[in-house]
């Protein structure tokens, strides 16, 4: 099968697709999934070079997120609700390949209204943003929220979820084209470009001097954003896409009664597994209601061009969720026959 095999640690641009990659061998609670689309992440670039916290033994197949169908030759362990052909999405190492082995109890059924491309980018971004806004910041209808990197994977999900909750959303990004994305696909009420000095004044003008009740920050712009936070505001620490881990002067937290709130979705599996099903139910209900819709970068990449897709992420060109199309979904063609 085809697979992006990492035999020696290197940047993805230095690795060629293998056409004789080893077929995955399912473990005890695993099933085999034919991958249709796989999600691209910045951490894939780090992992292929051995610079990510999770360092699989060599050789391994790169890629974590995917959507696909349960393979015809998959074992079906006792208790597994899926059967061959079922549409599923989830996460397992080795998704940049024709087939991946995954624990069945970590997978979710892919709703008919969600495409494989959309499904490939859901598993990390949407629960992160939902739980941050609902479970951690307790965002309420009518409140102001500032979302940084608002056109990015987690950011655009946060914009849509905040709008669905009835909040007033100020989307912030580093490029005007990304502000358009946040408005067009996210429904943001206002936009600001944080590459322009003094952008916080625009936020204060928009909120009539009050500032925002919630900051959602996957970039590392907490210090900058605290200049336009409201009294008793909550600042959500989501990530450090900008590459630096900030140090926050604690007097800023004291002066405006600010709550600094962390969110690590991946750790819920260990610390709070009971919270995972209700979060997913709420997200799938939002999709079913039509209030939210996963946003996919308009350029999709083939497995052969995978490194180009990762390069686009590295160059900060992508918006929404960038994916690699592994197989064409012929469902619609079949329906027309
Ligand atoms: N806490 C959690 O549980 C959790 C879960 C998922 C992801 N995350 C983290 O959230 C962050 C964003 O993830 P994502 O999937 O949304 O990524 P993404 O789609 O690649 O978006 C990241 C955005 O960050 C902005 N950015 C600012 N400075 C940058 C820089 N120096 N290099 C690259 N991008 C920069 C860019 O938007 P502009 O060009 O508009 O500035 C970029 O589009 C990552 O750090 C990720 O690790 C955390």
Image: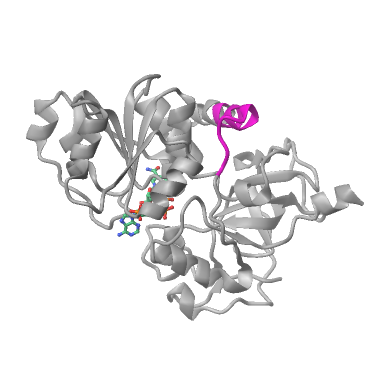
Above or below for 13 versus 236: below
Q: Is residue 297 left or right of residue 180?
A: right
Query: What range is drawn magenta here?
Result: 282-294
Note whether residue 65 is visible. yes
**Picture residue at 14% right of the left edge, 31% below the top:** 253
Give above or below for 41 relative to 219.
below
Foreground of the two, 42 or 58: 42
Residue at 10% in and 40% down: 249
Image quadrant where one finds the N terminus:
bottom right
Task: Say if 88 sits above or below 258 in the image.
Answer: below
Tell me which residue sits at (18%, 26%) in the image.
Answer: 209
Q: What secondary structure do most residues of the magenta stretch adopt?
A: helix
Q: 243 or 105: which is nearer to us?
A: 243
Q: Name which residue lies at 38% across and 40% down.
A: 264
Nearest the eye: 195 or 100: 195
Q: Nearer the viewer, residue 14 or 293?
A: 293
Image spot of residue 215 (x, y percent): 29, 34
Is residue 67 at least partly visible in the picture?
A: no
User: In the displayed image of the protein, which residue is found farthest to the top?
Assistant: 141
């Amino acid at each position: 099968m085809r697979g992006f095999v990492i035999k020696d640690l290197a940047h993805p641009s230095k690795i060629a697709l293998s056409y004789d990659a080893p077929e995955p061998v399912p473990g005890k609670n695993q099933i085999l999934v034919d991958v249709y689309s796989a999600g691209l992440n910045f951490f894939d670039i780090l992992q292929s070079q051995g610079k990510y916290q999770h360092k699989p033994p060599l050789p391994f197949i790169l890629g974590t997120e995917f959507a696909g169908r349960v393979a015809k030759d998959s074992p079906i362990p006792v208790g597994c609700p899926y059967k061959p052909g079922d549409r599923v999405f989830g996460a397992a190492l080795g998704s940049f390949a024709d087939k991946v082995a995954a624990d069945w109890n970590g997978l979710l059924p892919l709703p008919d209204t969600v495409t494989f491309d959309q499904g490939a980018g859901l598993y990390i971004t949407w629960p992160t943003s939902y739980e941050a806004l609902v479970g951690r910041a307790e965002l309420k209808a009518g409140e102001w929220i500032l979302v940084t990197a608002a056109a990015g994977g987690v950011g655009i999900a946060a914009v849509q979820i905040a709008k669905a909750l009835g909040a007033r959303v100020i989307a912030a990004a580093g490029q005007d084209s990304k502000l358009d994305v946040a408005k067009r696909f996210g429904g943001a009420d206002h936009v600001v470009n944080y590459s322009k000095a003094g952008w916080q004044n625009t936020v204060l003008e928009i909120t009539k001097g009050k500032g925002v009740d919630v900051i959602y920050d996957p970039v590392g712009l907490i210090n900058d954003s605290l200049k336009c936070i409201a009294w008793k505001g909550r600042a959500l620490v989501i990530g450090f896409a900008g590459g630096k881990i900030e140090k926050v002067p604690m007097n800023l937290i004291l002066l405006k009664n600010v709550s600094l709130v962390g969110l690590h979705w991946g750790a819920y599996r260990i610390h709070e597994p009971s919270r995972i099903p209700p979060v997913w139910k709420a997200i799938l209900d939002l999709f079913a209601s039509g209030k939210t819709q996963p946003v996919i970068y308009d350029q999709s990449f083939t497995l052969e061009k995978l490194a180009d897709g990762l390069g686009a992420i590295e160059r900060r060109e992508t918006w929404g969720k960038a994916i690699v199309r592994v197989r064409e979904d012929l469902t619609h063609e079949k329906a027309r026959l």
